[in-house]
Amino acid sequence: MTSAAFLGLAHVLRRLGAGTLAFITRLGFATRFALAVIRNSPAAVRRIHLTLRELYFAGVLSLIIILVSGLFVGMVLALQGYDVLIRYGADESLGILVALSLVRELGPVVAGLLFASRAGSAITAEIGLMKATEQLSAMEMMAVDPMARVVAPRFWGGLIAMPLLAALFSTLGIFGAYLVGVKLIGIDAGAFWGNMQAGVDFRFDVLNGIIKSFVFGTAVSVIAVFEGYVAKPTAEGVSSATTKTVVVSSLTILALDFVLTVFMFRGLGV
Amino acid sequence: MPDTRLPVAPAASRCPDIAVELDNVTFGYDARTVLSGITMSIPRGKVVAIMGGSGSGKTTILRLIGGQLKPRSGRVIVAGQSVPDLDREALFEMRRGLGMLFQFGALFTDMTVFENIAFALREHTELPEEIIRDLVLMKLQAVGLRGTAPLKPAALSGGMARRVALARAIALDPMLVMYDEPFAGLDPISLGVVGQLIRRLNDALGITSVVVTHDVYESLKMVDYMYFVAEGRIVAQGTPAEIRASDEAYVRQFVDGEADGPVPFHDPAPAYADDLFAHD
């Protein structure tokens, strides 16, 4: 090996090592931050009006995008599903296909991705701007802990909002599928709802979907408050933190979804 | 029984006449030293200015006093307590006796002016809302902005926001108020108003004031004592009369606004000719 190639390889290894170390350091810091948020959670309960306010911002203000997306995803799913099922004469199974797809996967995942883009980015930007304009420092100097006053209520607001939004997403999705499948295409309504009722198990499907949306909500909320809190106190820093929240949350949701699915449905032979 | 008492300023210092004492304080980030051997004492009831150019370490001194930073070495004593040695609970207890005005006010933008000033009262006391309302209006009256109570900070001018922040800083009747560049970006009228307010509130409420600023003329009019900080060291100190009469080179450059002097006009760089002919 020539010395130039050796130096090049050493450079690549050094970069890789530095990147890995930085990643582990940040992960450790984020974990400690998450623990601090949980430690300060009793404050979010004591200041319940603040948590409710954040629930409104993260939940109620995300309703439009969640409901409309859910409706359209359900309608498209019904069209695509019908196209395949009709080939095998199984078009009456459309209800169960749509319901399982939404409750198990698309509800928690797509609602999580939308939640990260709409509410997660807003939480990061708000905390980041508070830091950039020294509002967090001012709070500390007034002997008020920003972790308890600012971070914990936003974390809990996001965490509570996410499973509710995912449930609404799935509900509207199923309604969208009903509109397309029953009202537009003409599938029998009794078969649509009956197959769905018979084929969807509460513990296996619905509860697992709720657990997934709860886990995604926790992940997105932690990432959003963390990125805002550690953002560089500049316009560029806040902008970068907001982008990071969306990217990291989205990748985390997809990775967690795979891991959770493996554990939840391992009885299927996975 | 709800606690309706206002927080009490920390107990008297070992030297009761001294509110803040820094003894041979050194501070830095990694390899960069920001403050080196800073020694100063701030007597109770006085207005003391810490002056110096941008990046000289003035604001760092305030953050050391408030316990937001810890020194590498040396002692920081506030009201008889060693700030770096306080645990989080004791530090927050001490801060209840401090007020701080940030450079651009740092008002909470999601709250009204009223809520900003009521914030600390609501957080630290269980006073009835009627009492809080009266206290907030009294503080706003003191800074001449009682009419702005229902407004959001975005509706205020820079000078008004600074005055509201000043009212917020004195909401809990602190024993010490720290001002970080209170004159930055203000028009001459607002600048004069804020300067007079700092002096008047200090004397009327019997508090101690530390003003970090680079506005030499406004400071000379209102402070009792001045420290000049350059490159992390105290290079001069004295009463306004002593500073005016000083022939110390740094003080003269600062007071007279000279472009060149102990603080050079040119930032360190390779020789001009070398740079110009570098492509040859």
Image (spheres, rainbow, N blue to C red):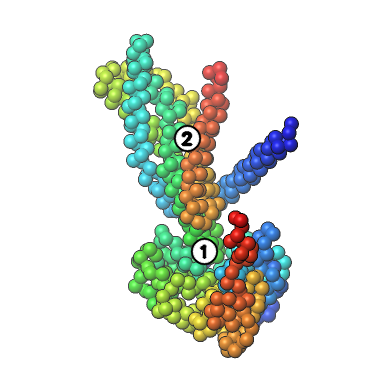
Under circle 2, the secondary element is helix
* Placement of B278 over or under A97, stated as above or below: below
Which residue occupies 41% across, 69% down? B158
Which residue occupies 43% across, 73% down? B186
Name the chain letter of the residue that bears numbered label 2.
A
- Number of callouts: 2
Q: Say which amino acid is labelled 1.
A: Ala
Residue B60 image-quadrant placement: bottom right
Name the chain letter of the residue that bears numbered label 1.
A
Marks 1 and 2: in contact by CB < 8 Å? Answer: no
- Viewer-closest of B278 and B110: B278
Residue B69 image-quadrant placement: bottom right
Q: In the image, residue A50 lies at what x, y percent?
A: 44, 53
User: Would residue A254 be found to the left or right of residue A73 on screen?
Assistant: right
Under circle 1, the secondary element is helix
**Extreme-top residue of the structure:** A88
* Placement of B74 over or under B111, stated as above or below: below
For the residues labelled 2 and 1, the Cα–Cα distance comes to: 35 Å
Q: Disc 1 designates what residue?
A: A138
Q: In which quadrant of the rendered image does the C terminus of chain B lie? A: bottom right
- Viewer-closest of A156 and A13: A13
Q: In the image, residue A60 lies at what x, y percent?
A: 37, 44
Q: Disc 2 designates what residue?
A: A213
User: Would residue B157 be found to the left or right of residue A4 on screen?
Assistant: left
**Extreme-front residue of the structure:** B280
